Structures are given as C-alpha cells and as structure tokens.
C-alpha cells in the first residue's frame, strides 16, 4: 500500500488530498508554515521545513514514504528542487502536480518579466496606482520603487510592510472576478503585478484586468529541474496505482 507525502499549499494539492482521503490511501500533507492558519486537510498534516534536501531525504526514510507528489506552487522553486534531489537520493518515485502557465488572451495587455527583480525594475517611472498581488514574501523588493501607491493583498495581517504608500487588504483566495473587479475599481488601479501562478485560485485578477482594460506586469515562473509532471489529480492517482 502506498504511503504518500504531498508537498502542498495549493488548490491542486487540496484536491489531491481530498481524493486520496476518499480512497483511503495513506498520505501526509505538508505545509511550509508560511501563514498563521493554513487550511485544514482531510489527511494528517505536518507544518514546517524539512531542513533542505537532506532533511527531506531523512523524513522520507524515517516515515517509510513510498511516493512523493510535489503539488507546491510554481514559484516554490526551492522546495521543488529539494524534492527532486531527495527522491533521487532515496530512489523514491516523485511526480509533480502542476498547473499550466497562463497566456495572454484577446484584450489582454501583458508585459512579461522573467523574475521579481525585473518586475521591480519595470516599475520605474512616474507614480501609478499598482495592485501588487504577489503576496508578502517579496514586498520589500518593491521599496525600490516607492513612488507608487500600492494595493496589497495579504493572507495574514502584517504591520511590517516596507512601502511608504500602500493600502493592504487581508484576504486569502481563491478569488472571484467580481470581487477583484470591484476591488480594482475601488482602488482606481492602473496596473496589476502578478506571478504566473496558473490555476484558478489567482486568475480572477487577470480576468478583471481584461474587463477593465488594465495592463498587467506578468512575472514568469522560475525554471525547475526535469521531473514527471501531471496536470490533474486523476493522472496522479493512476501514477500512484502503477508505480
Ligand atoms: C501557506 C495555504 C485553496 C488554496 C489556496 C493557488 C491558490 C488561493 C492565489 C492574489 C495572489 C500568492 C499567495 C496565492 C494564492 C491559492 C491557495 C494561493 C497568491 C495559501 C496557503 C499558504 C500560502 C502561502 C502564500 C505565500 C504567498 C502566496 C498569497 C492555505 C493561502 C500571492 C501567490 O504571507 C505569506 O508569507 C504568504 C506567502 C507563499 C506568496 C508570497 O510571496 O507571499 N501563497 N497561500 C502554504 C504553506 O505554509 O505551505 O492556507 O491554504 C494557499 C493558496 N494561495 O484552494 O484554498 O493554489 O495558488 N497565494 C501567487 O500566486 O502570486 C495570491 O492575491 O491575487
Ligand atoms: P520555497 O521558497 O520553494 O521553499 C523555501 C523552503 O520552505 C523550502 O526549502 C522548505 O524548507 C520550505 N517549504 C516550502 N514548501 C514546503 C512544504 N509544502 N512543506 C514543507 N516545507 C516547505 O517555497 P515558498 O515559495 O516559500 O512556498 C511555501 C509554501 O507556500 C508552499 O507550500 C507553496 O506551495 C505555498 N505557496 C507558495 C506560493 C508562492 O508564490 N511562492 C503561492 C501559493 C502557495 P526546507 O528546505 O527546510 O525543507
């Protein structure tokens, strides 16, 4: 019988946890511990780092993990790299549950940048009202462009925001187009900064931007090492049954 480790923190990871719980497959759901109250899961959950690739390999051995599914966010690159190394070191089958990147559609005005630092550089110029929907971890990078008025969306209250001119709302997704459109109209948003997360949980702001004719600064994903990748839970369950 499999003993699955799900590296979680995303909508897709939650769907996988629900399916394996329904099928009675032994699994542990892992959070990094980034937010105060992570969503409860229908399988046993652990919170916190493993201690690098070596720590993850140790965890795999000590808990007799038979399969690892990396269902982390596409920007959780370090976790994904560690999973590839730890599973190679312990000869543990690894599959990623990913979501395809978003692509600009008819009516979209996107400027692609390769990473967060380039997004900061692209914000040079006169002050604008910017919806900075990239979370909390990299906010201080944007202090290099203090001229803008930033609308921030955070999972938890944060009083340590290093930006001089901002308004923060505390709200965790998944978000809806109606909510995001109303939010941007209320804030008189002129530009949206977004990670290319893919999936459905963060997409609403792009659809709202299209409806409002607003430009988007789209941060492309970091490159990840080669690994088996699936786009939906059914494929993962099939892989689990046959590996
Ligand atoms: C701790 C665990 C679900 C899953 C919810 C998804 C969708 C909603 C949209 C915007 C973009 C952002 C952020 C975002 C989304 C889902 C999914 C997703 C983006 C939770 C969660 C954890 C985190 C960590 C958090 C980061 C932050 C990023 C907010 C749970 C709610 C901006 C990414 O304060 C912090 O330290 C927050 C850190 C990493 C990125 C950052 O740099 O700040 N996610 N988000 C996970 C852990 O501890 O292991 O409580 O559910 C999960 C979700 N966040 O169906 O309920 O699947 O992507 N998460 C981005 O995409 O840009 C918000 O505001 O439009
Ligand atoms: P990261 O930068 O790739 O990882 C940094 C370190 O955090 C990892 O080396 C690992 O520590 C620990 N870690 C990350 N994910 C973990 C997990 N699921 N379980 C246990 N430890 C984990 O990751 P991140 O970008 O901070 O993302 C952290 C979590 O938030 C992940 O669950 C991810 O799915 C979720 N998330 C991230 C984003 C985003 O924009 N980055 C968006 C939505 C959700 P050790 O080296 O000590 O093991």
Image (spheres, helix red, strand yellow):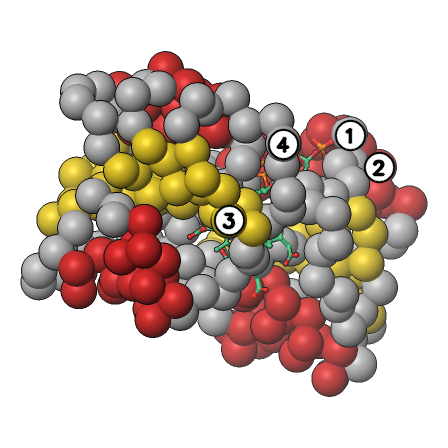
The residue under the point 64% across, 46% down is: 156
Q: Look at the numbered discs 3 and 2 and tell me whether their residues touch, using CB distance below 8 Å.
A: no
Disc marking residue 51: 1
Q: Residue visible at 80% across and 69% down?
A: 43
Determine crowd level at label 2: few under 14, some 14-19, many 20+ residues with C-alpha closer than 10 A: some
Tell me if the residue at label 3 has its CB under 8 Å from ligand 1: no
Q: Could you tell me which residue is drawn at 22 percent across and 56 percent down? A: 209
Q: Position of residue 162 (x, y in %)?
A: 51, 21
Q: In which quarter of the image is residue 80?
A: top right
Residue 22 seen in render: yes
**For residue 58, which numbered disc appears in the image?**
2
Viewer-nearest of discs 3 and 1: 3
The location of residue 47, given as percent across then percent down, is 79, 47
Badge 4: how crowded within 10 Å, few (<14), some, or many (20+)?
Answer: few
The answer to whether residue 56 of the structure is visible from this angle is: no
Quadrant, the N terminus: bottom right
Image mark for residue 169: 3
**Left or right for 224, reference 3:** left
For marks 3 and 1, the one nearer the N-term is 1
């Amino acid at each position: 019988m499999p003993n699955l480790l799900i590296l979680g923190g995303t909508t897709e990871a939650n769907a996988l946890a629900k399916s394996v719980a329904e099928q009675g497959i032994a699994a542990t759901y892992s959070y990094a511990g980034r937010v105060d109250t992570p969503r409860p899961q229908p399988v046993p959950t652990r919170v916190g780092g493993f201690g690098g690739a070596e720590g993850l390999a140790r965890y795999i051995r000590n808990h007799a993990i038979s399969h690892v599914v990396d269902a982390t966010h596409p920007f959780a690159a370090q976790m994904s790299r560690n999973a590839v190394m730890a599973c190679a070191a312990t000869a543990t089958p690894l599959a990623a549950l990913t979501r395809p990147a978003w692509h600009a559609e008819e009516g979209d005005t996107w400027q692609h940048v390769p990473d967060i630092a380039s997004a900061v550089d692209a914000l040079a110029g006169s002050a604008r009202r910017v919806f900075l929907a990239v979370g909390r971890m990299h906010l201080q990078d944007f202090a290099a462009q203090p001229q803008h008025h930033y609308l921030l969306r955070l999972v938890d209250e944060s009083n340590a925001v290093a930006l001089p001119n901002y308004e923060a709302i505390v709200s965790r997704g998944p978000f809806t187009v109606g909510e995001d459109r109303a939010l941007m109209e209320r804030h008189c948003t002129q530009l949206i900064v977004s990670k290319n997360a893919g999936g459905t949980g963060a997409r609403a702001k792009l659809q709202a931007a299209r409806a409002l004719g607003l430009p988007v600064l789209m941060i492309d994903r970091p490159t990840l090492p080669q690994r088996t990748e699936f786009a939906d839970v059914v494929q993962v369950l099939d892989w689990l049954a046959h590996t």
